[in-house]
Amino acid sequence: MVVAKGIVVLFGIVFLFAGGVMLIRPTLFRSWIAKAGSTPLINYGEITIRLIPAIAMVYVAPETKLPLFFSFLEGL
């Protein structure tokens, strides 16, 4: 559980960093986004990396203030 919480916090920091870059240097951020989908390998790699915090969030959800938000996944 500690690892999952750490992953959620780490990716939160990464998202805050990306938001800061988007606000301060939008041209640089646009070039990063253009590279993100430039090849299938990069595209699928990015999707796989995004799955890591998503799975961690679902795993940590029962300990949050709003665990019902993730309850629709129980039937899957």
Image: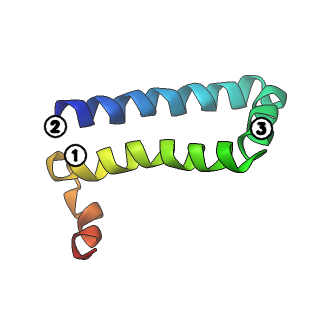
Q: CA distance from mark 1 to mark 3?
A: 31 Å
| Residue to which mark 1 is pinned | 60
Q: Position of residue 27 (x, y in %)?
A: 84, 29
**Which residue is depicted at the point 53% across and 33% down?**
15
The first of marks 2 and 1 along the sequence is: 2
Residue designated by label 2: 1
Disc 1 residue type?
Answer: Val
- Judged left or right of residue 51, residue 44 is right
Few, some or many C-alpha atoms within 10 Å of disc 2 (few <14, some 14-19, many ≥20)? few
Q: Nearer the viewer, residue 46 or 61?
A: 46
Disc 1 secondary structure class: helix
At 23% from the left and 67% from the top, the residue drawn is 71
Q: Residues within 10 Å of mark 3 (few under 14, many from 20)?
A: few
Q: How far apart are the two marked residues, 2 and 1, measured between alpha carbons? A: 7 Å
Q: Secondary structure at mark 3?
A: helix
**Badge 1 or badge 3: first in the primary sequence:** 3
Q: What percent of the width, then of the height, locates residue 2?
A: 18, 30
The residue that disc 3 covers is 35
